[in-house]
Amino acid sequence: MPLLTIRLPQEATLEAALRELKLTADDVDTAYGLVAVDPANDLYAIRVTDAAAARMTTDAPGTEIFADPRIEPADGSPIDPKPRA
């Protein structure tokens, strides 16, 4: 899913972002939610479907769309969730 950034008022909510972008819950990754990237500058991120991202390129000035590829170790080994001492 592409990652979209948008400027919203401080302490914005996912619902506020959906209204601003004219999206539905089906257009976004609700588990990812709305992430405050730089709240001091009102910058937030949200993951959207490919179809929603395509609409955003023409419908929502002030938004930027980025690829959000899955990150895995280069050697294919599983990621160890426990930090090493």
Image (spheres, rainbow, N blue to C red):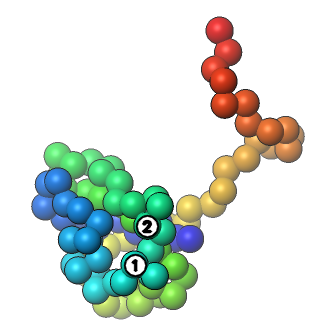
Q: Position of residue 66 (x, y in %)?
A: 48, 66
Question: Looking at this view, is 23 or 31 the one in front?
Answer: 31
The residue lying at 35 percent from left, 54 percent from top is 35
28 above or below 14?
A: below
Q: CA distance from mark 2 to mark 1?
A: 7 Å
The residue lying at 48 percent from left, 69 percent from top is 29
Residue at label 2? Answer: 30
| Residue lying farthest to the left in this orientation | 9
- Quarter of the image for the N terminus: give it: bottom right
Examine the image and state in which quarter residue 9 appears. bottom left
Earlier-in-chain disc, 2 versus 1 = 1
For disc 2, the neighbor class at 10 Å (few under 14, some 14 to 19, many from 20) is: few
Examine the image and state in which quarter residue 44 appears. bottom left
C-beta proximity under 8 Å, tags 2 and 1: yes
Q: Is residue 13 left or right of residue 56?
A: left
For disc 1, the neighbor class at 10 Å (few under 14, some 14 to 19, many from 20) is: few
Q: Secondary structure at mark 2?
A: loop
Q: Is residue 83 left or right of residue 76?
A: left
8 above or below 40?
A: below
- Quarter of the image for the C terminus: give it: top right
The residue lying at 27 percent from left, 48 percent from top is 38
Q: Is residue 25 left or right of residue 43?
A: right
Q: Is residue 33 visible?
A: yes
Q: Position of residue 34 (x, y in %)?
A: 34, 60
Question: Looking at this view, is 31 or 20 the one in front?
Answer: 31
Amino acid carrying label 2: it is Thr
Question: Looking at this view, is 46 or 25 the one in front?
Answer: 25
Residue at label 1? Answer: 25
Residue 79 - label: none
Examine the image and state in which quarter residue 46 appears. bottom left
Amino acid carrying label 1: it is Ala
